Amino acid sequence: MTDERACREEICAIGRDLYARGHTSGSAGNISARLSDGWLITPTDVCLGRLTPEGIAKADFEGNWVSGPRPSKTVTLHRRIYEQRPDCNGIIHTHSTHLVALTLAGVHAENAILPPITPYQVMKIGRVPLIPYERPGSPKAAVRVAELASSVNGVMLDRLGPVVWGRSVTSASDALAELEETARLWLMTTPRPALLDDAALADIAAVFGVKWD
Protein backbone atom coordinates (compact mmCIF):
# COMPACT_ATOMS: atom_id res chain seq x y z
CA MET A 1 0.00 0.00 0.00
CA THR A 2 1.47 3.38 -0.97
CA ASP A 3 -1.39 5.78 -0.16
CA GLU A 4 -0.07 7.36 3.04
CA ARG A 5 -3.37 8.88 4.15
CA ALA A 6 -5.18 5.55 3.68
CA CYS A 7 -2.42 3.79 5.65
CA ARG A 8 -2.76 6.25 8.51
CA GLU A 9 -6.52 5.76 8.63
CA GLU A 10 -6.19 1.98 8.46
CA ILE A 11 -3.74 1.97 11.38
CA CYS A 12 -6.18 4.06 13.44
CA ALA A 13 -9.12 1.80 12.59
CA ILE A 14 -7.22 -1.37 13.46
CA GLY A 15 -5.90 0.21 16.65
CA ARG A 16 -9.44 0.98 17.78
CA ASP A 17 -10.55 -2.54 16.90
CA LEU A 18 -7.67 -4.18 18.81
CA TYR A 19 -8.43 -2.02 21.83
CA ALA A 20 -12.17 -2.75 21.69
CA ARG A 21 -11.52 -6.50 21.50
CA GLY A 22 -9.26 -6.33 24.54
CA HIS A 23 -6.20 -7.43 22.57
CA THR A 24 -4.32 -4.39 23.87
CA SER A 25 -4.69 -2.18 26.91
CA GLY A 26 -3.28 1.07 28.18
CA SER A 27 -0.42 2.23 25.99
CA ALA A 28 0.81 -1.27 25.11
CA GLY A 29 1.41 -2.49 21.57
CA ASN A 30 2.34 -0.98 18.24
CA ILE A 31 1.38 -1.05 14.56
CA SER A 32 3.34 -0.20 11.40
CA ALA A 33 2.64 -0.05 7.66
CA ARG A 34 5.01 0.02 4.70
CA LEU A 35 4.93 2.98 2.29
CA SER A 36 6.73 3.59 -1.01
CA ASP A 37 9.18 5.96 0.74
CA GLY A 38 9.49 4.36 4.18
CA TRP A 39 6.92 3.29 6.73
CA LEU A 40 4.52 4.51 9.37
CA ILE A 41 4.64 3.35 12.98
CA THR A 42 2.62 4.19 16.05
CA PRO A 43 4.32 6.41 18.66
CA THR A 44 5.82 5.21 21.90
CA ASP A 45 3.49 5.05 24.92
CA VAL A 46 0.28 5.90 23.05
CA CYS A 47 -3.01 3.99 23.42
CA LEU A 48 -3.87 2.18 20.18
CA GLY A 49 -7.54 2.87 20.84
CA ARG A 50 -7.01 6.63 20.64
CA LEU A 51 -4.76 7.05 17.61
CA THR A 52 -5.22 9.87 15.12
CA PRO A 53 -3.91 9.88 11.51
CA GLU A 54 -1.72 12.92 12.24
CA GLY A 55 -0.39 11.37 15.45
CA ILE A 56 1.46 8.50 13.75
CA ALA A 57 5.23 8.61 13.27
CA LYS A 58 6.99 8.19 9.95
CA ALA A 59 10.39 6.54 9.41
CA ASP A 60 12.59 6.00 6.38
CA PHE A 61 13.62 2.54 5.19
CA GLU A 62 16.61 2.57 7.58
CA GLY A 63 14.30 3.22 10.52
CA ASN A 64 15.32 6.85 10.98
CA TRP A 65 12.65 9.11 12.45
CA VAL A 66 11.33 11.39 9.68
CA SER A 67 8.25 13.12 11.08
CA GLY A 68 5.48 13.00 13.65
CA PRO A 69 5.83 11.98 17.30
CA ARG A 70 8.64 9.74 18.54
CA PRO A 71 8.26 6.20 17.09
CA SER A 72 7.68 3.11 19.20
CA LYS A 73 10.77 1.68 20.91
CA THR A 74 10.27 -1.46 18.77
CA VAL A 75 11.18 0.43 15.59
CA THR A 76 14.25 -1.78 15.01
CA LEU A 77 12.13 -4.92 15.29
CA HIS A 78 9.73 -3.65 12.62
CA ARG A 79 12.58 -2.62 10.32
CA ARG A 80 14.20 -6.03 10.58
CA ILE A 81 10.96 -7.79 9.61
CA TYR A 82 10.37 -5.51 6.61
CA GLU A 83 13.92 -6.19 5.43
CA GLN A 84 13.31 -9.94 5.49
CA ARG A 85 9.77 -9.89 4.09
CA PRO A 86 9.30 -7.80 0.93
CA ASP A 87 5.74 -9.18 0.73
CA CYS A 88 4.90 -7.72 4.16
CA ASN A 89 3.11 -4.36 4.33
CA GLY A 90 1.80 -4.40 7.88
CA ILE A 91 3.07 -5.48 11.32
CA ILE A 92 1.24 -5.61 14.66
CA HIS A 93 2.59 -6.24 18.16
CA THR A 94 0.25 -6.54 21.13
CA HIS A 95 0.33 -7.82 24.69
CA SER A 96 -2.73 -10.04 24.10
CA THR A 97 -3.84 -11.57 27.40
CA HIS A 98 -4.23 -15.24 26.49
CA LEU A 99 -1.04 -15.38 24.45
CA VAL A 100 1.01 -13.83 27.25
CA ALA A 101 -0.69 -16.20 29.70
CA LEU A 102 0.36 -19.06 27.44
CA THR A 103 4.04 -18.16 27.87
CA LEU A 104 3.58 -17.95 31.64
CA ALA A 105 1.80 -21.30 31.81
CA GLY A 106 4.12 -23.06 29.37
CA VAL A 107 3.99 -23.07 25.57
CA HIS A 108 3.60 -26.25 23.53
CA ALA A 109 7.15 -26.12 22.15
CA GLU A 110 9.77 -23.49 21.39
CA ASN A 111 9.32 -23.90 17.62
CA ALA A 112 5.51 -23.77 17.87
CA ILE A 113 3.85 -22.13 20.86
CA LEU A 114 0.59 -23.88 19.98
CA PRO A 115 0.01 -27.16 18.15
CA PRO A 116 -2.41 -27.22 15.18
CA ILE A 117 -5.87 -27.55 16.71
CA THR A 118 -8.16 -25.61 14.35
CA PRO A 119 -8.14 -25.26 10.56
CA TYR A 120 -8.32 -21.46 10.63
CA GLN A 121 -5.32 -21.34 12.95
CA VAL A 122 -3.37 -23.22 10.28
CA MET A 123 -4.78 -21.14 7.43
CA LYS A 124 -4.53 -17.67 8.99
CA ILE A 125 -1.28 -17.77 10.95
CA GLY A 126 0.43 -21.18 10.88
CA ARG A 127 3.32 -22.17 13.13
CA VAL A 128 4.39 -19.46 15.57
CA PRO A 129 7.76 -19.89 17.33
CA LEU A 130 8.76 -18.54 20.74
CA ILE A 131 11.43 -15.85 21.08
CA PRO A 132 13.18 -16.14 24.48
CA TYR A 133 12.66 -13.20 26.83
CA GLU A 134 14.44 -9.94 26.16
CA ARG A 135 13.52 -6.55 27.59
CA PRO A 136 11.00 -4.45 25.60
CA GLY A 137 12.71 -2.80 22.62
CA SER A 138 15.82 -4.98 22.90
CA PRO A 139 17.84 -5.18 19.65
CA LYS A 140 18.64 -8.79 20.56
CA ALA A 141 14.97 -9.69 20.14
CA ALA A 142 14.92 -7.93 16.75
CA VAL A 143 17.85 -10.06 15.57
CA ARG A 144 16.17 -13.27 16.74
CA VAL A 145 12.91 -12.37 15.00
CA ALA A 146 14.73 -11.45 11.76
CA GLU A 147 16.32 -14.90 11.69
CA LEU A 148 12.85 -16.47 11.52
CA ALA A 149 10.82 -13.85 9.66
CA SER A 150 11.21 -15.32 6.19
CA SER A 151 9.71 -18.69 7.18
CA VAL A 152 6.79 -17.73 9.46
CA ASN A 153 4.03 -15.12 9.67
CA GLY A 154 4.46 -14.27 13.32
CA VAL A 155 6.41 -14.90 16.50
CA MET A 156 5.69 -14.86 20.22
CA LEU A 157 7.89 -12.73 22.45
CA ASP A 158 8.14 -14.50 25.80
CA ARG A 159 6.17 -12.62 28.49
CA LEU A 160 5.50 -9.71 26.10
CA GLY A 161 3.14 -10.79 23.34
CA PRO A 162 2.80 -11.66 19.66
CA VAL A 163 4.31 -9.93 16.65
CA VAL A 164 2.35 -10.73 13.48
CA TRP A 165 2.86 -9.53 9.91
CA GLY A 166 0.93 -9.74 6.64
CA ARG A 167 0.07 -8.21 3.27
CA SER A 168 -1.63 -5.33 5.09
CA VAL A 169 -2.29 -4.08 8.61
CA THR A 170 -5.79 -5.53 8.34
CA SER A 171 -4.60 -9.00 7.33
CA ALA A 172 -2.04 -8.97 10.16
CA SER A 173 -4.84 -8.03 12.58
CA ASP A 174 -7.03 -10.89 11.36
CA ALA A 175 -4.17 -13.35 11.85
CA LEU A 176 -3.42 -12.03 15.32
CA ALA A 177 -7.09 -12.35 16.32
CA GLU A 178 -7.09 -15.99 15.20
CA LEU A 179 -3.91 -16.67 17.16
CA GLU A 180 -5.24 -15.05 20.35
CA GLU A 181 -8.51 -17.00 20.06
CA THR A 182 -6.60 -20.25 19.59
CA ALA A 183 -4.55 -19.53 22.71
CA ARG A 184 -7.78 -18.89 24.63
CA LEU A 185 -9.27 -22.19 23.44
CA TRP A 186 -6.10 -24.08 24.33
CA LEU A 187 -5.94 -22.62 27.85
CA MET A 188 -9.62 -23.20 28.61
CA THR A 189 -9.79 -26.81 27.38
CA THR A 190 -9.17 -29.64 29.86
CA PRO A 191 -8.12 -32.22 28.88
CA ARG A 192 -6.22 -30.74 25.96
CA PRO A 193 -7.97 -31.22 22.59
CA ALA A 194 -6.77 -33.69 19.99
CA LEU A 195 -4.56 -32.15 17.33
CA LEU A 196 -5.33 -32.00 13.63
CA ASP A 197 -3.72 -35.11 12.21
CA ASP A 198 -1.42 -35.37 9.20
CA ALA A 199 -4.31 -36.21 6.86
CA ALA A 200 -6.27 -33.11 7.93
CA LEU A 201 -3.19 -30.90 7.55
CA ALA A 202 -2.47 -32.36 4.11
CA ASP A 203 -6.08 -31.70 3.06
CA ILE A 204 -5.83 -28.04 4.17
CA ALA A 205 -2.56 -27.67 2.28
CA ALA A 206 -4.02 -29.19 -0.89
CA VAL A 207 -7.19 -27.05 -0.88
CA PHE A 208 -5.94 -23.75 0.53
CA GLY A 209 -2.24 -23.84 -0.32
CA VAL A 210 -1.04 -23.35 3.25
CA LYS A 211 1.21 -25.76 5.15
CA TRP A 212 2.01 -26.32 8.78
CA ASP A 213 5.79 -26.39 8.74
Image (cartoon, rainbow, N blue to C red):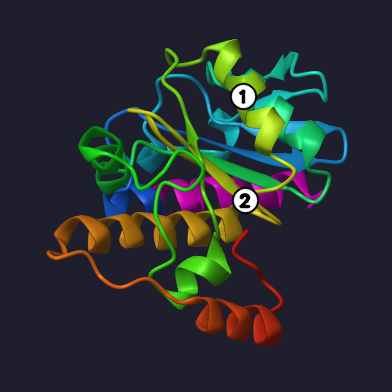
- Type of the residue with mark 1: Arg
Say which residue appears at 26% left-offset and 47% top-offset: 98
Say which residue appears at 40% left-offset and 26% top-offset: 46
Residue 44 has which mark? none
- Type of the residue with mark 2: Asn
**Residue 17 pos. (x, y %):** 39, 55
Q: Quadrant of residue 109?
A: top left
Q: Quadrant of residue 27?
A: top left
Few, some or many residues within 10 Å of mark 2 (<14, 14–19, 20+): many
Is 203 in the magenta? no
Q: Earlier in the sequence, mark 1 or mark 2?
A: 1
Is residue 68 at all visible to an observer of this figure?
Answer: no
Is residue 134 at all visible to an observer of this figure?
Answer: yes
Is 168 on the left-hand or right-hand side of 20? right
Write down the residue under mark 1: 144
Is 93 on the left-hand or right-hand side of 107? right
Q: Which residues are magenta?
A: 1-16
Main SS category, magenta section: helix
Q: Find the residue positioned furthest to the front.
A: 198
Say which residue appears at 53% left-offset and 76% top-offset: 198
Q: What element does badge 2 sit on?
A: loop
Q: What element does badge 1 sit on?
A: helix
Few, some or many residues within 10 Å of mark 1 (<14, 14–19, 20+): some
Mark 1 or 2, closer to the camera:
1
**Residue 140 pos. (x, y %):** 58, 13
Write down the residue under mark 2: 153
- Nearer to me, 77 or 3: 77
Seen in the picture, residue 118 relative to 47 is either above or below; the reply is below
Seen in the picture, residue 135 relative to 200 is either above or below; the reply is above
Is 12 in the magenta? yes
Q: Quadrant of the C terminus?
A: bottom right
